[in-house]
């Protein structure tokens, strides 16, 4: 049981719910899009279940490989994590990582909706996502070291492609709607992902990672990412009026207002005392980033079923 707790801690369970929710939200939007709702049968729901489990497992793999290659950084920034604390060996960490990747790919293969088994769109999206996950943490690319490239290789899989993968468990992604929705989330994550970097400056600098706070300073980096908490959600009413979004127009407009307001509040927390970002582990803005993502996921799902 003690070792099981170590593996659970290594997976970072707090971060696993948002990706699973993202797939479910993407599936619900696909189900309600264009006013074509299939009956809720096991044949419809099972691919969504496999997709949600896939997202959680793939995120655990992402967390694991990041901790493997960030071991020296975590000795400075997060010494209580299983690897730097000595509660887990590198061999155990690699075994967990590879098992999670294989399980995620198997679940993605199963997440094909009826009639689209031949294309296996979710599987191919997840394979490409796995490449980006690897590129972010592992040599030779290790984009985590390279400023904005780190943000891009987080935003594409965890923002853009997460929504598209969820959609693919119900309908084909050969439709501009899931890509438009994914763009909204991708742009948000592009800036918001930096909130985790402010408190890690010491270890990241020692590990050769040039994050935005290291490259531009805490204050300037905070102002650089601030627009990404607000402007992506302005795209929602634009999508409604151009008919790229086919959910409930009123609910989508209200969701946009809610997220813009929430984003402005989070920006206030970011820029009020930016120096505090570098000294507070899990700064409130980091927590609000996760909460904003979950509010957006639930909001989109509701706008497509009500």
Image (cartoon, rainbow, N blue to C red):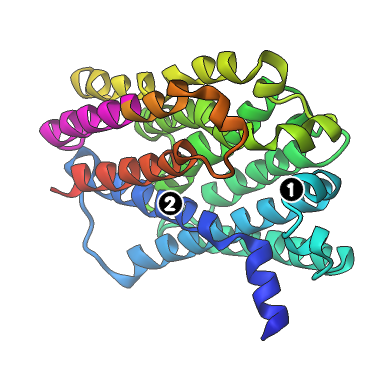
**159 left or right of 141?**
left
Residue span colored magenta = 246-264
Q: What type of secondary structure mainly makes up the magenta span? A: helix
Of residues 31 and 94, the one nearer the viewer is: 94
31 above or below 94? above
* Residue bearing the label numbered 1: 66
166 above or below 207? below
Of residues 40 and 92, the one nearer the viewer is: 92
* Residue bearing the label numbered 2: 23
Q: Position of residue 274 (x, y in %)?
A: 52, 23
Query: Which of the 4 image quadrants contains residue 142?
Result: top right
Query: Which of the 4 image quadrants contains residue 196?
Result: top right
Q: Is residue 148 visible?
A: yes
12 above or below 168? below
Residue at the location (25% across, 41% down)?
33
Residue at the location (21% across, 27% down)?
257
Find out whether residue 255 is within the magenta segment.
Answer: yes
């Amino acid at each position: 049981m003690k070792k099981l707790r170590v593996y659970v801690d290594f997976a970072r369970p707090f971060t696993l719910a948002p990706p699973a929710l993202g797939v479910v939200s993407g599936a619900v939007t696909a189900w309600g899009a264009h006013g074509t709702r299939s009956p809720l049968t096991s044949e419809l729901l099972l691919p969504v279940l496999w997709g949600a489990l896939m997202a959680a497992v793939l995120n655990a793999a992402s967390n694991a490989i990041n901790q493997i290659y960030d071991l020296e950084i975590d000795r400075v920034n997060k010494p209580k994590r299983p690897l730097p604390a000595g509660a887990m060996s590198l061999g155990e960490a690699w075994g967990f990582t590879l098992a999670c990747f294989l399980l995620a790919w198997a679940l993605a293969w199963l997440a094909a909706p009826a009639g689209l088994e031949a294309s296996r769109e979710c599987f191919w999206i997840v394979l490409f996502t796995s490449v980006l996950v690897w590129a972010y943490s592992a040599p030779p690319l290790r984009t985590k070291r390279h400023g904005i490239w780190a943000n891009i290789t987080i935003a594409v899989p965890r923002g853009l492609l997460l929504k598209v993968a969820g959609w693919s468990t119900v309908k084909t992604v050969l439709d501009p709607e899931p890509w438009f929705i994914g763009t909204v989330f991708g742009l948000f994550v592009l800036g918001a992902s930096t909130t985790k970097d402010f408190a890690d400056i010491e270890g990241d600098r020692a590990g050769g990672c040039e994050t935005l706070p290291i490259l531009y300073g805490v204050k300037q980096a905070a102002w650089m990412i601030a627009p990404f908490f607000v402007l992506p959600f302005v795209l929602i009413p634009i999508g409604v009026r151009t008919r790229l979004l086919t959910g409930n127009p009123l609910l989508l407009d209200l969701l946009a207002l809610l997220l813009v307001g929430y984003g402005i509040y989070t920006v206030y927390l970011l820029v009020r005392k930016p120096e505090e970002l570098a000294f507070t582990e899990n700064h409130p803005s980091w927590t609000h980033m996760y909460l904003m993502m979950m509010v957006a996921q639930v909001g989109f799902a509701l706008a497509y079923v009500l």
